[in-house]
Amino acid sequence: MSYSVPINFKACSASVLLWLAHSSWNLRRAWLLCGAPHKAHARRPFWALHESQGFVPGSIAEQALQRIAALYAIEARIRGQPPDVRRQVRQARAGPLLEDLRAWLASMLGKVSTKSELAKAIGYSLARWKSLTRYRDDGRIELDNNAAERAQRGVALGRSNYLFMGSDAGGERAAAIYSLVETAKLNGLDPQAYLRDVLARIADHPINRIDELLPWNIGGHHVEQRLAA
């Protein structure tokens, strides 16, 4: 099956996509042009191997995990900092670790069977190295998108119950609702209370001031006051 991937190349200069490698060549091509795969998907094969091997100390898989953990430790210390600060710290501290990791992975690749799961795990990272390390020079990019994946877990768990939206328009409306719900959560709002408040107001609200009803503008205290009234 082939896929058609609409992409706004002008928007790529202002935003970055964190992605999971897809088997479709068209998707890979689009993401490689202006995206950044996230580190968690480079880490997971090593964790699976380490687990399947009974957590053997000193294994290649464990060594890879320890090296990747050092990169995450740097991220933990600069989380929430401005992009310029993150870029500077990453270049100074993560940069050398990334170069060491790449050299180590390349050396390990020559010591394992080319058909082994370990070789596949190493090959995944090396084949995507430029994209995997793009975050080092761009403070806007997260090391991974685990937060976004966790936010979408509820959608994934329920998809068998609402597999069919009825139409493309139905799917678009569902995507809009999912976006509002998760954005409300990120802004500290109870999604149910937020949507109930917005639905009660939207019919009489001026269309040219619709942005006032967005989660980051409406405010949790305001929602609570209106619902208590």
Image: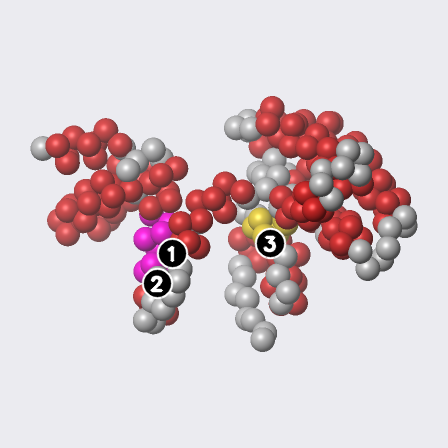
- The residues colored magenta run 171-180
The alpha-carbon separation of the residues under discs 2 and 3 comes to 24 Å
Tag 1–tag 2 contact (CB < 8 Å): yes
Q: Residue at x 19, y 32 (%)?
A: 224
Provide the secondary structure element on which disc 1 rests. Answer: helix
Left or right: where 110 falls relative to 90 = right
Compare marks 3 and 1 and give the one earlier in the sequence. 3
- Can residue 84 be seen in the rendering of this structure? no
**Marks 2 and 3 in Cβ contact (< 8 Å):** no
Residue at image mark 2 = 162
Q: Is residue 139 left or right of residue 185?
A: right
- Mark 3 Cα-neighbour bin, 10 Å: few <14, some 14–19, many ≥20: some
| Magenta stretch holds residue 67 | no
Eye-nearest disc, 3 or 1: 1
* In the image: residue 73, left or right of residue 177: right
Task: Name the residue beneath numbered marker 1.
Answer: 158
Which amino acid is tagged 1?
A: Gly
Q: Position of residue 54 (x, y in %)?
A: 71, 41
The residue at the far top in this view is 77
Task: From the image, tell me which residue sits under label 3.
Answer: 20
Q: Quadrant of the N terminus?
A: bottom right
User: Depth check: 94 or 110 in front?
Assistant: 110
